[in-house]
Image (tube, helix red, strand yellow):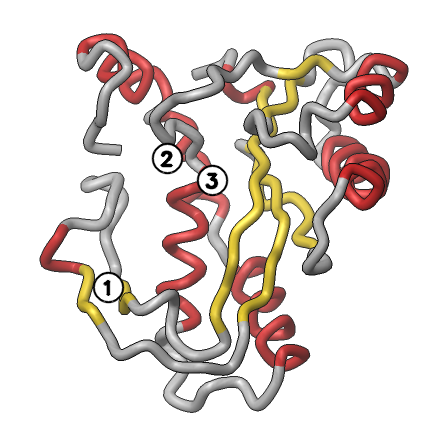
Amino acid sequence: VDQWKQVMFSDESSISRMSSSGKEFYYSDLEHKRFQDHQVKRTKQHGGGKLMVWGCITYYGAGDLAWSPDLFNSDYYLTVLQDEVIASRDWYNMDPATFIFQHDNSSVHTAGKVKKFLDENNITVLPWPASSPDLSPIENVWHYLKWKMNQYEVPPKDMDELWKRLEDEWDKIPIEYFQELYKSMPKRVAECIRQKGGRTKY
């Protein structure tokens, strides 16, 4: 667990203004580490658009959350690395010498200019298989955030209001939630090994 504390996990996710991609999520406590089938209710699809967000998490709390443009390209991602990743790392006083950054293998993340920036700034990237189960705990955070969005009785009137709600709920996620997710990482990896890279309960 102490080794995982050095890692910052990051990811992008799409948040719908009306419902969460046709699903309504119920609360799942940390003991379960995931949403059970009976805690997910199918809902009617609505219109209203989606908001793409990028976020990062640490053992010490939530990092920055960014409203991503529809065209999430390597040029924009460079600004995210500079303005959000480094700032979040420094905010929590994570040691740059031992700091490890995680992102998946999307073409945006693996672009030459992105790799060059990471190398020039001595940012160690956690090796991530090209095809792998979702071991990153930030996936749990996205589920939690979408569940919080579904608790509002009145849908946001526009994307600006949706973004404001996301920011508010992101900032209110308790630090204990992140810490329990990080503590689960050794078990996640062990189960992934047992399943030979196949589907796990996480």
Q: Are marks 3 and 1 in contact (CB under 8 Å)?
A: no
Residue 148 visible, this orientation = yes
> At label 1, which amino acid type do we have?
Tyr
Relative to 73, does residue 137 appear above or below in the rendering? above
- Determine whether the residue tagged by mark 1 lies in a helix, strand or loop: loop
Which residue is label 3 attached to? 138
Question: What is the spatial separation of the Cα atoms under label 2 and label 1, in whole angstroms?
Answer: 19 Å
The answer to which of marks 2 and 1 sits earlier in the sequence is 1
Relative to 35, does residue 160 appear above or below in the rendering? below
- Determine whether the residue tagged by mark 3 lies in a helix, strand or loop: helix
Q: Are marks 2 and 1 in contact (CB under 8 Å)?
A: no
Tell me the quarter of the picture where residue 123 sits.
top right
Residue in the picture at 68% in, 30% down: 109
Residue in the picture at 55% in, 58% down: 170
188 relative position to 125: left or right: left
Which residue is label 1 attached to? 26
> At label 2, which amino acid type do we have?
Glu
